[in-house]
């Protein structure tokens, strides 16, 4: 059994096509098919059920491919570790970035990292904190920038706090409360809200704050991006609570401190068991900070 056969098997399972798998692996289809046939003969099982039009992974194939992925990761880690022992940082680095990071300038950090470690292939994924935590634990993500409610401490990952801020209210400049210098949650309880989807970590911060205050609110609009969030507020469709760094200088809106508003904590998270040299270098390149953005 060879690593190349493992790569072919994983590619076929993910592409569900021998043709596309061959293109992905930069090999002619006949050579890929011969290697898979040889592998199946060695194992004594069929990994793929195929016709001229369709390819499906068999139960034996699913079990094999799952372990093949682990073997390929281990082989890649062995190469990277050998290079790191020789003083070279290489390999790949996959970073998850939530759309509401304010503690660091992610673009600047990535630019500096690329200049310092040009041999590392960097990949960026966007999404939510909960998703990133699952993917880090599963070994699918190396590092993640997270935003969590105060007091939430996930297990299974190592985390460094980057900032801790109380969320502020963002309202249209035409809103009846726009002239206030400070608000409380009860002032906003009867207002329609724009927020992130229910169940997401971005939404959890505000939900917990209203629950603890014994208040109920109505979220009329659920969105996934900060720009759309503030855009709907600017149109007078609702109000929202966000980190001060996202609220500052939003055209057509005002941001007002909320004395009992939720506290949001930004973290850098990574694999607590065995981070790759590239992941460790990235973590080491980001200092802890205490970002404060005036409203």
Image (tube, rainbow, N blue to C red):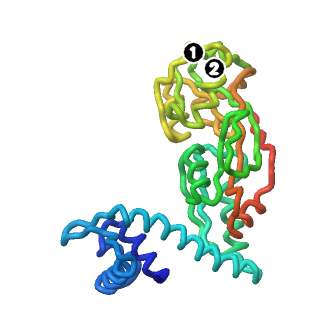
Residue 73: give x, y in percent of width and height.
57, 70
Q: Earlier in the sequence, mark 1 or mark 2?
A: 2
Q: Nearer the viewer, residue 281 or 84?
A: 84
Residue at 57% across / 19% down in the picture?
175
Residue 98: give x, y in percent of width and height.
59, 47
- Categorize mark 2 by other alpha carbons within 10 Å: few (<14), some (14-19), many (20+): some
Q: Nearer the viewer, residue 111 or 173?
A: 111
Residue 185: give x, y in percent of width and height.
66, 17
**Label 1 with label 2: CB-CB less than 8 Å:** yes
Q: Nearer the viewer, residue 271 or 236?
A: 271
Q: Which mark is residue 261?
A: none
Residue at 58% across / 76% down in the picture?
75
The residue that label 1 is drawn on is: 216
Q: Secondary structure at mark 1?
A: loop
The residue that label 2 is drawn on is: 210
Picture layout, residue 251 above or below residue 215: below
Whether residue 23 is visible to the viewer of this picture, yes or no, is no
Q: Nearer the viewer, residue 20 or 99?
A: 20
Residue at 64% across / 25% down in the picture?
208
Residue at 54% across / 67% down in the picture?
70
Residue 65: give x, y in percent of width and height.
43, 67
Whether residue 164 is visible to the viewer of this picture, yes or no, is yes
Q: Gap in Å between the C-alphas at discs 1 and 2?
A: 6 Å
Which corner quadrant of the image does residue 168 belong to?
A: top right
Instruction: Using residue 144 as the reference point, say whether residue 33 is left or right of it.
Output: left
- Categorize mark 1 by other alpha carbons within 10 Å: few (<14), some (14-19), many (20+): some
| The C terminus, quarter of image | top right
Q: Secondary structure at mark 2?
A: helix
């Amino acid at each position: 059994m060879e690593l190349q056969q493992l790569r072919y098997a994983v590619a076929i399972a993910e592409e569900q096509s021998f043709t596309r798998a061959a293109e992905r692996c930069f090999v002619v289809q006949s050579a890929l098919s011969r290697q898979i046939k040889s592998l199946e003969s060695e194992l004594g099982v069929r990994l793929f059920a195929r016709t001229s039009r369709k390819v499906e992974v068999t139960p034996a194939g699913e079990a094999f491919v799952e372990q093949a992925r682990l073997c390929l990761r281990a082989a890649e880690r062995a190469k990277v570790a050998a290079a790191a022992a020789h003083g070279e940082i290489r390999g790949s680095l996959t970073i998850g970035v939530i759309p509401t990071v304010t503690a660091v300038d992610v673009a600047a950090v990535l630019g500096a990292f690329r200049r310092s470690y040009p041999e590392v292939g960097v990949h960026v994924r966007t999404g939510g904190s909960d998703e990133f935590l699952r993917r880090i634990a599963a070994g699918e993500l190396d590092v993640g920038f997270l935003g969590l409610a105060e007091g939430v401490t996930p297990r299974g990952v190592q985390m460094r706090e980057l900032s801790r801020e109380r969320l502020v209210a963002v309202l249209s400049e035409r809103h009846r409360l726009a002239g206030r210098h400070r608000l409380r949650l009860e002032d906003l309880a009867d207002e329609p809200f724009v927020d992130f989807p229910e169940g997401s970590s971005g939404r959890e911060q505000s939900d917990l704050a209203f629950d603890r205050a014994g208040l109920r609110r109505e979220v009329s609009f659920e969105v996934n991006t900060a720009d759309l969030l503030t855009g709907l507020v600017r149109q007078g469709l609702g109000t929202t609570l966000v980190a001060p760094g996202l609220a500052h200088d939003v055209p057509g809106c005002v941001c007002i401190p909320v004395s009992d508003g939720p506290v949001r904590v930004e973290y850098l998270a990574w694999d607590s068991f065995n981070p790759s040299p590239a992941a460790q270098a990235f973590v080491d390149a980001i200092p802890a900070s205490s970002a404060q953005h005036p409203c």
